[in-house]
Image: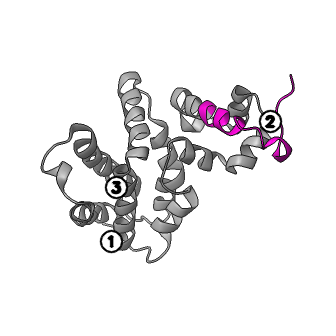
């Protein structure tokens, strides 16, 4: 049986869903960094060109497999377009981060990844994705002493708030509006990102 290839075979109704299912498995089992387009294609029994035809890139494949509300390019644009200063960039970063968590469709796979990470001790694919896509870009704008540590502290702060709000459901944190949350968290994130 030959593998389905490129755009001419893209009409197959189940090829796209098979690719997504294969991608979800691979990201969950192997992580973001070790998942490849070729590996996903092999598991879905399609040609790698069909994966590229449907999704364009590994980043887009991951974003769709975890139902992120926008493409990686839009994430990057929303965070990094505009004033690169610590406070302005921090506000955009915090808002985009919590908007993703607010959507039930993207929250479910994020929670699933965290559970797997806690049970296996392996970093969740979302963490690797965020590092590759966003944290490395933030590093281009962060200077001064212990820049890498400060970026990691910002990431830890965001994830800690997300855990208490969306996983533990701690009140009143779980009930404040996103605007209130962004207003409270942004100054702390900015303090990590601004040079000391």
Q: Nearer the viewer's eye, disc 1 or disc 2?
A: 2
178 to the left or right of 123: left
Asked whether residue 20 is drawn in magenta, I would say yes
In this figure, which residue is indicated by the disc labeled 2?
47
Specify the segment rendered in magenta.
1-22
Residue 113 versus residue 177 in the image, above or below: above
Q: Is mark 1 on a helix, strand or loop?
A: helix
Q: Quadrant of residue 121?
A: top left
180 to the left or right of 76: left
Asked whether residue 5 is drawn in magenta, I would say yes
Q: What's the CA distance linking mark 1 and mark 2?
A: 45 Å
* Disc 1 to disc 2: CB gap under 8 Å: no
* Disc 3 to disc 1: CB gap under 8 Å: no
Q: Quadrant of residue 146?
A: bottom left
Whether residue 149 can be seen here: no
Q: Earlier in the sequence, mark 1 or mark 2?
A: 2
In this figure, which residue is indicated by the disc labeled 3?
98
Tell which of 101 and 146 is nearer to you.
101
62 to the left or right of 177: right
The tag on residue 87 is 1
Give the residue displayed 54% in from the left and 49% down from the top: 132
Residue 177 versus residue 165 in the image, above or below: below
| Mark 2 nearby-residue class (10 Å; few <14, some 14–19, many ≥20) | some
Give the residue displayed 50% in from the left and 42% down from the top: 66
Residue, far bottom: 83
């Amino acid at each position: 049986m030959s593998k389905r290839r490129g755009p001419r075979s893209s009409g197959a109704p189940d090829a796209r869903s098979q690719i997504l299912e294969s991608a979800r498995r691979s990201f969950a089992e192997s992580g973001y960094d070790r998942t490849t387009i070729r590996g996903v294609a092999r598991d879905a029994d399609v040609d790698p060109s069909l994966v590229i035809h449907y999704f364009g890139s590994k980043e887009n494949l991951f974003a769709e497999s975890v139902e992120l509300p926008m493409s990686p390019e839009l994430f990057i644009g929303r965070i990094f377009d505009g004033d690169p200063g610590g406070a302005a960039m921090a506000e955009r970063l915090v808002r985009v981060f919590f908007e993703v968590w607010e959507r039930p469709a993207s929250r479910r796979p994020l929670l699933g990844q965290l559970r797997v990470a806690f049970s296996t001790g392996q970093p969740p694919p979302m963490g690797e994705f965020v590092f590759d896509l966003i944290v490395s870009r933030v590093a281009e704008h962060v200077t001064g002493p212990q820049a890498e540590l400060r970026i990691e502290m910002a990431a830890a702060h965001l994830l800690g708030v997300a855990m208490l709000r969306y996983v533990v459901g701690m009140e009143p944190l779980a009930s404040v509006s996103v605007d209130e949350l962004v207003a409270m968290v942004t100054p702390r994130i900015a303090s990590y990102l601004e040079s000391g």
